[in-house]
Structure formats: structure tokens, C-alpha cells
Image (tube, helix red, strand yellow):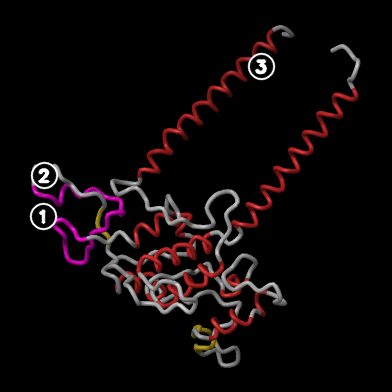
Amino acid sequence: MATMFPETSMRSMKKTLVLIAAAAGLALVAQPAAAAGGKGHALRDGNFSFEGPFGTFDQGQLQRGYKVYREVCASCHAMDLMSFRTLAEPGGPFYDAHQASAAENRFVRALAKEVQIADIDTETGEPIMRDGTAADRFPNPYPNATAAAAANGGAAPPDLSVMAKARHGGARYIYSLLTGYLNPPAELQIRPGQYYNAYMAGDLTPFMPEGSHDVPPGGFIAMPNPLMDGQVTYDDGSAETADQYARDVSAFIAWASDPKQVQRKQSGVGTLIFLLLFAGITYMSYRRIWKGVAH
């Protein structure tokens, strides 16, 4: 029994290593498939400041992105997981280092007051509409999913709370999609309520003449082009173009999908520095303790 136990352990360890290697192989194989995401163009580079391990969000861009969302996107797309006070958290578009708390931020309170929130009167039990507060979540443009689908040709607009996390490419995907509305080829068969987008995943072969070898990239999307030049007024002098709007709202949605992203990056860098210092001290201690000892 004593001689068989190590052999059994070795076999078990080998099986475990094989399973780990197989899982890693599957992950590597699955990664390109997920990255492909259909036959659209390669995603555009938005030159976002928050990309990379040391990237941070541009507060001015987040403020512009929120304005684009509020004035354009919010008429169809909800952000049910976002509260107004989140806008004033550290790293957020309206964070103020001198604020007592996020809920007391004067900008957030003013923005929340601009919307009406459906509520219940605590005394009469009757439904009422009241001014929003910092604790309220962003209002949904539709009372329920059925109403949202009915107002949009049978397909409810997706919630944007975590859209950058839900789509491969994150902010780059959103930016590319918003700027991907191009004039379709003349021979492409487009049905009513559909719009051609070069970055939308899809296969347009069935909608081209039979035998056609020049199939355009991209696919169909039910949302018409929501952005146009001069649509939103910027107070900071930034370019009021559809491309800039798309870039700014993409950054805002990326932040909303992960408001603690920058803090997590900073914590990770600090942890790595600590581990490197600890490893160096450990190694020097090891050399000092075992100095002169043959081993």
C-alpha cells in the first residue's frame, strides 16, 4: 500500500494537469471566436483615455457623454442599474472633491430634479409623479418590456447599464456601431424597419443577389442612426459632430458599466508593487538565514 499511494497520487496529478491544459486550450480557441463577433469590420479605435492598465476616465468626456445619453439615448434606452448619486462617486462625471457625499452633490441633485419619478403617496396610497432625488435610479422610458417592444417594432431596446460589459470590445464596439451607419450597396435587399450597419454582426449573403461574391460586411440593425451633427450642444467648446457624440457616449456607457474600474486598476497596481517588494525581502531573508549552510 505504501508503494502504491505515491503512484496513485502521481496519476491523479497528471489527470488534473491534463484537464487544466485542456481547459486552457478551449479558452484559447474560444477567444478568437468571441472576438470575431460576426462579419463586421474590425472595431474602430476610439483612443479612449481609460484603456490600458493605467488609464483613467476624462471627467469632461463623461459629462458630455451623459448629456448625449440624456438628450438622445434615454428616449429609448433605459439604464435601470444606474442611480443619480452614482454620477458623483469618485471617478464619476460630476464628482467633486469638496462634496459632503455623493447624494449631496449639487450637480446631481439638480440633474435628478429635472426628471419626474413615478411613486406612491405614503398617505393616500395614490400613484403620483414627483421630482427625482439623488437616490433615485434613472427613469425608464417605458412602463414595462411589453410597452417597449410595442413601441419599437416588436423588439425592446436593450438596457445600457452594463452594455460595455455585455459586448465584446466594450466602448470600441459601441463607438463603432454608432458610427457604422453607411450607405448600403444598391443590390442589398433591406426590409422596412431595418438599417445597414457595417459593424453589426450578421451574414448578409441571403440578402444579396444569388451567386454574388461581393457580400458587404456587417448586418442589419433595427435602430436608425440616432446621431447627427449639431444635435447636442456642448458647453465646453468640444466639436458638436456625430463622431464626437458617439465617442463621448461610448465612454460614458463604459464608465457606467464599471464605475469602480479605475479604483480597481489602482488597487491592482499597488498590490503588485507590494508583492514585488515582499518577494524581494523574502529572498534576501532566505539568503541571510541560509548563508554558509550547504543545501
Magenta-drawn segment:
183-209
Q: Amino acid at mark 2?
A: Ser
Considering every residue shown, the one lying at the far left of the view is 210
**Residue 68 placed where, x, y %?**
43, 73
Helix, strand or loop status at disc 2: loop
Which residue is identified by label 1?
A: 187
Q: CA distance from mark 1 to mark 3?
A: 65 Å
Query: Depth check: 129 or 112 in front?
Result: 112
**Residue 291 placed where, x, y %?**
90, 19
Q: Could you tell which of marks 1 and 2 lies nearer the N-terminus?
A: 1
Residue 232 is at least partly visible in this image: yes
Query: Depth check: 221 or 292 in front?
Result: 292
Q: CA distance from mark 1 to mark 2?
A: 10 Å
Give yes or no for contact between labels 1 and 2 (Cβ–Cβ under 8 Å).
yes
Binning the other alpha carbons within 10 Å of mark 1 as few (below 14), some (14 to 19) or many (20 upward) gives few
**Residue 25 placed where, x, y %?**
47, 29
Asked if the stretch drawn in magenta spans residue 184, the answer is yes
**Residue that appears at 78% across and 39% down:** 277
Foreground mark, 2 or 3? Answer: 2
- Res. 9 mark: 3
Residue 271 lies in what quarter of the image?
Answer: top right
**Residue that appears at 59% across and 73% down:** 94
- Main SS, magenta region, reads loop
**Residue 254 placed where, x, y %?**
49, 60
